Image (spheres, rainbow, N blue to C red):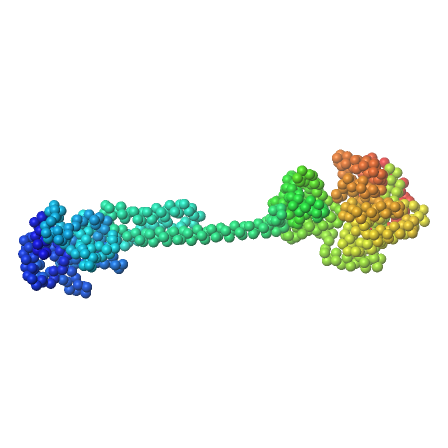
Amino acid sequence: MYAKALRQLREAGAATIAFDVDFSASSRDGSDAVFAAEIERSKGAVVLPIFFQQDGRSHNTPISMLAKEAAFGGVNVPVDADGKVRRYYTAIDGANASMAMAIAGAPPPLQDSFLIDFGIDASGVSRLSFTDVLSGSFDPARVRGKAVLIGGTAIELGDQFSTPASARMEGVLIHALAYESVIQRRMLQEQPRLMTLLMAIAALAALWPKRQSLNVGELITRHAAMVSFAILAPLVIQRYLPLSIPTSEVLIAQTLCLWFSIQQELQRRSDELIAQREDHLSFIARHNSETSLPNHLAMIEEGADFDLRDADLHPAAILIGIDRFATLRGAVGYAHAGAALKAFALQVEKLEDGEVTRKGPVFQLSPSILGILVHLPSSADAEKAAKSYLERLDARIHLEGSELALHWRAGIATHGENVRTIIENAHLALDAALLQNKSVNFYNSANATDPKRQLSMLIDVAEGLERGDFSLVYQLKVDATSYKPKGAEALIRWRHPQHGFVPPDQFIPVAEHSGAIHRLTEFAISVAVKDQVRMKKLGLDLPLSVNLSGRSIADVAMRDFIIDKCNRFGARLCLEITETAMIENPEGAKDSLKRFKAAGISISLDDFGAGLSSLAYLKDWEADELKLDRSLIKDVKTGERDRKILGATVELAHSLGMMVVAEGVEDEEMAIKLADLGCDSLQGYFFTAPKPFEAMIETAAALPSAMVKS
Ligand code: C2E
Ligand code: CA
Ligand code: CA
């Protein structure tokens, strides 16, 4: 049968006829001889198979009768670990070429094996059925000059392999493709491992994630380019060169880079998120939630690099507090009050002065207190400079179309161990400004209120009254033109057994915070009423003024006590009440004022010009006397504008039926100017200092002839 096939093919002009058929056993019917004769006739054009047994030692060769005139070709194919056939031997042992090499008649190359080029189209291999060959019913042109491989193709024969090109490929077709690879010089060589490794390293270098933030588009482009390159480059190269490039390492490197890039980006984003959250927390910790203004902590931090020891720069903290902020907030609401404060902070920020320079922003230390850090000029001018700096502050705030006039005070401190204590001291100065009704107050370590001392003083006021530490001194008021005594103001004095003389500015505010002020007021009223009786007996009938603390005005028991005392002793008393005291409890104060007036007690509005000083209140209070504060009259000698304001105030007070007293008159020029402006009475060191009762009586008798009037 094979003999007949061989003859048909030879006669059709086939160049080589190879058999992938086992001829290692003789057939019994003598057909071997016929086949051997045909082989001989084919003159070396026949290739017969030899193959190794499974054990790898022995190999099957065709029976010697057939082997004489035929060439041998090894038909073993190496199967890779994954069960796929990729490579093809060049020879199966030292002597015998493999089937494809034998058919091609090519000298075996140096390497043991090569990669079959599965890129060669397997369907391009022409097929003839064995039966058609036997019967000669085929076109001889299809075999002429060609190599013909005869082998089993039926699935049952089991001679099938898995290849990269197809899951099942007949052994004979593998030999055919291997042959094509040989004659087309496409015996692919595997790339040396080192090369692959270098390519993988190059891929790593190209794709390794960079430090900076990831551009997702760029990442995708780079990786897509690398994947396309890894897939396409071997195909293109393989098209022109017998090189098979394994790119799995490159792809692994690429995947690794992709993974790292994603990891790094995720890490970077989480770091960024944490950093953002920390920034936010740090902002919250350093800013007021309502106004977003930097807070106390921020001020301390800003002040940390504020050189406190630099004597040339005179660092200082200024705290500006808004009076009655709680009342304002109650009236306009939290949101508007916050907006007002913010607008006020803007005004503070706008303050500019050649002598005072602000450092850092405007801070908010409490709902009603703003703070700034500044450099002041030399200590001698510091107070004046700070005051003129703050005087520029325009406290009129425009809120939703309406104007709001904020009343502020400032506390200033220049000395302290660190910025924290400077701020604290400025705070104490601000508290004191409120208690002493000053608009600007400098912290003074000498007379600073020591909390411990204040506490002991609270206890001591009661004890001091028992001990008889307290006394009254009197300062005369004189007629502005004749300098004749018109009255006297009673001022309280405390001679403390340990602390010595304690100024009323210090213990009155403290006593106001406890109930002790009532006992002090009772003391002052009692003594003044008795002293007036004594004065009358001495032939001096003057009204006496007693200062009434804000706390005492609306106190019904105190009111009744005062009225009762005056009635019993027939005293002519004047009560000096500060404006702030009345504003704090207007209803209670108004009621008391009415009753005092009904009882023949006159009312003097004290400290006008020191604090809020609204002319609008003047007509509401129906006082008998207006006392212009020292701060309002101190510039009367030089300031044209001050003089105008004073003149208008005096005029208004007169039109409302009030007498006008100027206090703190320290020299003659002031006295003359104030008299010119229309003041009715004057009070101050120029005429007399506050003196004990007897001394005051003597002074009163000597006035006005004691005054040298020019
Ligand atoms: P005030 O009612 O404004 O009293 C006037 C203060 O100015 C007094 O201080 C007086 O000694 C001072 N003074 C008088 N003439 C001059 C002057 O020409 N130049 C300067 N620089 N100062 C002058 P003092 O006695 O230390 O009293 C301070 C404050 O204590 C008073 O201010 C008053 O608010 C309060 N005070 C005094 N006695 C009493 C009292 O019996 N009851 C109450 N509730 N407060 C009192
Ligand atoms: Ca007074
Ligand atoms: Ca006063």
* Residue drawn at 60 percent across, 45 percent down: 360
Tell me: 591 left or right of 223: right
Question: Is residue 263 shown to the viewer in this render?
Answer: yes
Position of residue 218 measured from the top left corner of the image (x, y, whole percent): 40, 45
Report the quarter where the N terminus lies. bottom left
121, 318: nearer the viewer: 121
The residue under the point 77% across, 34% down is 644
- What's the residue at 13%, 60% (across, down)? 22
Residue 551 drawn at (x, y percent): 79, 51
**Residue at position x 75%, y 43% in the image:** 612
Query: How far across and how far down the image is residue 413, in percent?
Result: 68, 48
Pick whichever, 701 or 581, lies toward us: 581
Camera-side residue: 89 or 681?
89
Side of 89 where 365 appears, left or right: right
Compared to residue 60, the image places residue 578 above or below, namely above
Quadrant where the image shows the C terminus = top right
Q: On the rendered structure, is 444 left or right of 126? A: right
- Position in image of residue 372 (x %, y %): 64, 46
Location of residue 547 with respect to 35 vertically, above or below: above
Which quarter of the picture shows residue 618? Answer: top right
Image quadrant in which you'd find residue 48: bottom left
Whether residue 627 is visible here, answered yes or no, is no
Q: How many marks?
A: 0
